Amino acid sequence: MIRLAARLGGIAPFRVMQILARARAIEARGGDIVHMEIGEPDFISPPAVIAAGRAALAAGRTHYTPAAGLAELREAIATYYRERFSVDVASRNVLVTPGASGALQLLLGVLVDPGERVAVTDPGYPCNRHMVAMYGGEPVPIAVDVVNGFGIARRDLEAAMQGGLRALMLASPANPTGNLIANAQLAELADCLATQDGVLICDEIYQGLQYGSEPETALQTGRPNLVVINSFSKFFGMTGWRVGWIVAPEGLIEPMERLAQNLFLAAPTVGQYAALAAFDSATMMVLEQRRAEFEARRDFLFDAVAEMGFGVGRRPGGAFYLYADVSDFTDDSQAFCTRLLEEVGVAVTPGSDFGNHLAARHVRFAFTTGIDRLEQGAERLHRFLRAGG
Ligand SMILES: Cc1ncc(COP(=O)(O)O)c(C=O)c1O
């Protein structure tokens, strides 16, 4: 047996992958599953993006790019901030990465020393706490729930800061709650962290997927201790191309570039050329139609599950998730998810994938499938609950 590094002990697998594997096995036997567990858009990449990727391949663009990314893509991202959000970002402050995942690895790599504490929301994106642990840091959960509107209260941050904090990681819109955090509050959190030289890491990967309000960026706060992470994965529908980015203050860019040269050399070249077409006006029109479709799905699913007795609080303002309280039906959300899958063919993710706080009382629904399938899913849920859950 080859001995594993001790750091693996802190890295839990995604339970959703087990659910997905089991769902695929049921499908392979001819069963039908309504997939509400998958955290990526069902739409394929917009046509102009696919065409740009094809053209890059046809032109033989198969070599490395610079570690910081293609200069024209860094420039296009800076222009996007200027045109869409009226905020000045210099292209030298933009680093192109292999997805938001690559951005998180670089950022935590240059920020976190072993033993340092980094606050993460609980529930939150699970890789955050795992990546902090990979670098020897200590993830410090800050509980968020329906009572505080899934937002982070200043007093909770201050409590976490008692033991010293290197950074706070949050996402807006958030996974798994779909919660939005207003810029005024982000500015307050950044200022609070600044009293300890702490950094606010704002993950904006679901930016653009917003319902009933205009997308913002934390960069509009102008805070100097702020780093923004983003990606072409979700709003732009490019998960498989593996391209994301990070906007950071000057002093962090060169160290992250150095780390990128050592960790993965550069983001995928074809993906970067494809991403150049992501900001085209034709692409933006396609993406807006998709956003509207996600909004219709959110409304359908929210109303359907609220009526059945799931605790869903307010309508989520962004992303493509509903984080639902199932405590009226069970005190074990993981077992509940397993039964839903096995008995009525509905796949959803247990709260335990996203942390510990009230995890056994929650499941995450992803509305990453069409309304017709969501309708079938809702009918099956209804049947399951009527039969006694
Ligand atoms: C909040 C959040 N951040 C980052 C990621 C990673 O995305 P990617 O590496 O595809 O850009 C995800 C993926 O689900 C996510 O939900």
Image (cartoon, rainbow, N blue to C red):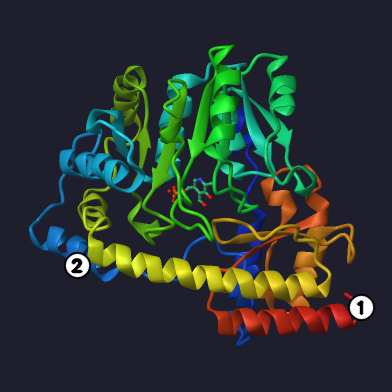
Say if 295 sits above or below 177 in the image: below
**Residue where numbered disc 2 is placed:** 51
Q: Is residue 341 visible?
A: no
Q: Residue at x 27, y 46 (%)?
A: 83
Residue 132: x and y in percent read: 57, 29
Q: Amino acid at mark 2?
A: Ala
CA separation in Å, label 2 and label 1: 51 Å
Pick out the residue farthest to the left: 59
Q: Is residue 225 visible?
A: yes
Q: Pick the residue in front: 12 or 145.
A: 145
Badge 2 density bin: few <14, some 14–19, many ≥20, Cα 10 Å:
some
Residue 126: x and y in percent read: 61, 44
Q: Residue at x 64, y 44 (%)?
A: 124
Q: Residue at x 43, y 38 (%)?
A: 229
**Residue where numbered disc 1 is placed:** 388
On residue 223, which mark appears? none
Q: Is residue 18 left or right of residue 272?
A: right
When asked about the image quadrant of residue 313, the answer is bottom right
Q: Amino acid at mark 1?
A: Gly
Mark 1: secondary structure = loop
Question: Quadrant where the C terminus lies?
Answer: bottom right
Badge 1 density bin: few <14, some 14–19, many ≥20, Cα 10 Å:
few
Some atom of ligand 1 lies within 8 Å of the CB belonging to the residue at label 1:
no
When asked about the image quadrant of residue 123, the answer is top right
Q: Pick the residue in front: 114 or 306.
A: 306
